[in-house]
Image (cartoon, grey):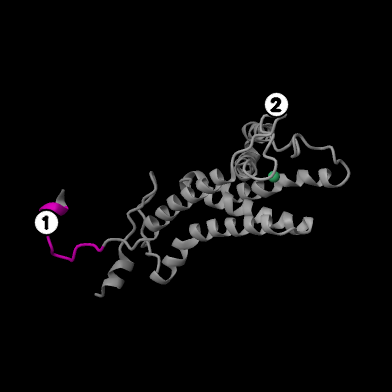
Amino acid sequence: MSRSLRREIRPSSIEVPGGRPARYPRAATPALRRWPIRLLPLVAVGGIVAVDLMLSRWSWPLVVDGVLDELGHLLTAALLLALLPPSVRGALWPWAMIGAVAIDIDHVPLYTFAPDFAVDGRPPTHSLLTVLILTGVAAALPAVRIPFAGLALGVCLHFVRDIATGPGVPLFWPFADAAVRVRYEAYLLVMAGAAAVATWKVVASTGAPAEPPAPGVEPGPAQRA
Ligand SMILES: [Zn+2]
């Protein structure tokens, strides 16, 4: 039997507690797909840097400026979500991705009919109070627990970028009006670190599984340990 065929029919070692043993083989990620997947975190950081260079070097119409910034938010959220264990990320991630951009809807009144709808530069809804309300709804209503918990997580991920760009974020409104702001370099450092950890996780999860011992071959002392 060829090595590749033996690898394909090897049963998965992942079993669900209380469930029946897995019968289906865990297919290794094909080599051709492995490297593009492993490069995704690096591509995400490159995308963030490219977006921010475009935003800082040129003046864009408001809509284009907004689209570029939301792209930066999506890449930021995706990178940080990749750090969470799959069991935590699970059903939350689509809602978290929505929350990571939807919070900026609060800029519509600011740019249209309510130019004063801002606290130290950004709308007051860019505050931990929004996260608290979304978390409270998730805790109080089991039927919408996942969507609202995901939205709360997404808003937190949104703040990671906003806090280092523009005027900062009035995180503690209504208790404090001053926007919280950190250096852009700190945000970039966090993103680079997240990309490094995410790459390590992807490499670990897409690596080819070890070959099983050939039939009839006893494991050596080192293997028994
Ligand atoms: Zn924002």
What element does badge 1 sit on? loop
Q: Looking at the image, which is closer to me, 207 or 213?
A: 207
Q: Which residue is mark 2?
A: 176
Q: Looking at the image, which is closer to me, 165 or 194?
A: 165
Which amino acid type is shown beneath numbered disc 1? Gly
Q: Say left or right for 192 vs 145.
A: left
Q: Which residues are magenta?
A: 211-223
Mark 2 packing: few (<14 Cα in 10 Å), some, or many (20+)? few
Mark 1 packing: few (<14 Cα in 10 Å), some, or many (20+)? few
Front label number (1 vs 2): 2
What element does badge 2 sit on? loop
Ligand 1 in which quarter: top right
- Residue 198 x/y as whole percent: 45, 52
Q: CA distance from mark 1 to mark 2?
A: 66 Å
Q: Residue at x 82, y 37 (%)?
A: 117
Secondary structure mostly seen in magenta is loop
Q: Quadrant of residue 139?
A: top right
Q: Quadrant of residue 137?
A: top right
Which amino acid type is shown beneath numbered disc 2? Ala
Q: Is residue 180 above or below residue 92?
A: above
Q: Looking at the image, which is closer to me, 205 or 108?
A: 108
Residue 90 can be seen in this image: no
Question: On the rendered image, what quadrant is the N terminus found in?
Answer: bottom left
- Residue 144 x/y as whole percent: 65, 40
> Which mark, by number, is residue 220?
1
Question: Magenta includes 221?
Answer: yes
The verdict on label 2 being within 8 Å of ligand 1 is no
- Residue 224 x/y as whole percent: 15, 51
- Residue 10 x/y as whole percent: 30, 63
Residue 68 can be seen in this image: yes
> Which mark, by number, is residue 121?
none
